[in-house]
Image (tube, rainbow, N blue to C red):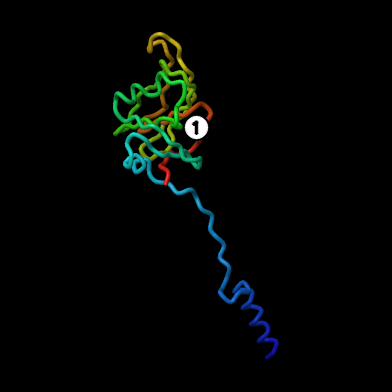
C-alpha cells in the first residue's frame, strides 16, 4: 500500500510539472502578424506600411493613379524619408517599367492580388535622352502590385500590410 501511494505521488508530480498550479505551458512559436495589403492601403492611400516576407515594415509612398504610376521615382537622388514606392492597380495588369530619368538603382517586385510574389529584378538608372531608349522591365505574369526599393533591399516572399 505504501508503495502504491508513493508511485501515485511521483506520477502526479511528473504530470503536473512539480507545481501546484499545473503543468508548465511553453509559449507556441509565433509568426509576424500581418494584414492584407488591401487593408494596409485603406487607412492612408498616399502612404502605406508594408512588409515582404518576414522582413521589417517598410514605409512606402503609394502610386495608385495613372499620373503617379507614370511619374514613379523619376528625378530623385534618394527616397527621402520613404523606404520605397508601391504601385497599385485596381485589377491585374502586365504594364512594363522603365528607368527613364530615374537616378537610383532599384529592385522591383511584382505581386498578385493576394500578395504572392510573381517576379522580381534589379533595374539600373537610364541616362538616355528619350524614354524609348531605356530598357524595359516586365514581370513574367500579370500582377496587381509592384514594389520598388533601393537595389539590394527587396526581401523575398509575399507582400502584406504591417499590423
Q: Is residue 11 left or right of residue 71?
A: right
Residue density around tag 1, few if under 14, some if 14–19, many if 20 or more, within 10 Å:
many
Quadrant of the image occupied by residue 138: top left
Image quarter of the N terminus: bottom right
- The percent coordinates of residue 154 (x first, y second) are 49, 32
Tell which residue pokes out farthest to the top in this image.
129
Q: Residue at x 41, y 15 (%)?
A: 101
Quadrant of the image occupied by residue 135: top left
15 in relation to 93, above or below: below
Q: Residue at x 35, y 33 (%)?
A: 144
Q: Secondary structure at mark 1?
A: loop
Q: Which residue is nearer to you in this view: 119 or 47? A: 47
16 in relation to 8, above or below: above
- The percent coordinates of residue 124 (x first, y second) are 49, 19
Q: Residue at x 43, y 18 (%)?
A: 102
The residue wearing badge 1 is 154
Amino acid at each position: 500500500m505504501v508503495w502504491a501511494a508513493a508511485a501515485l505521488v511521483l506520477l502526479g508530480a511528473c504530470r503536473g510539472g512539480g507545481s501546484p498550479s499545473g503543468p508548465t505551458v511553453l509559449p507556441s512559436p509565433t509568426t509576424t502578424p500581418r494584414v492584407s495589403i488591401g487593408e494596409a492601403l485603406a487607412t492612408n492611400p498616399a502612404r502605406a506600411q508594408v512588409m515582404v516576407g518576414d522582413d521589417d515594415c517598410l514605409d512606402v509612398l503609394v502610386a495608385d493613379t495613372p499620373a503617379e504610376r507614370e511619374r514613379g521615382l523619376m528625378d530623385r537622388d534618394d527616397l527621402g524619408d520613404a523606404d520605397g514606392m508601391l504601385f497599385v492597380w485596381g485589377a491585374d495588369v502586365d504594364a512594363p517599367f522603365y528607368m527613364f530619368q530615374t537616378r537610383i538603382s532599384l529592385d522591383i517586385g511584382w505581386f498578385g492580388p493576394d500578395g504572392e510574389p510573381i517576379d522580381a529584378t534589379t533595374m539600373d538608372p537610364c541616362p538616355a535622352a528619350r524614354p524609348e531608349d531605356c530598357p524595359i522591365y516586365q514581370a513574367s505574369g500579370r500582377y496587381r502590385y509592384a514594389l520598388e526599393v533601393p537595389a539590394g533591399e527587396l526581401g523575398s516572399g509575399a507582400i502584406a500590410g504591417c499590423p
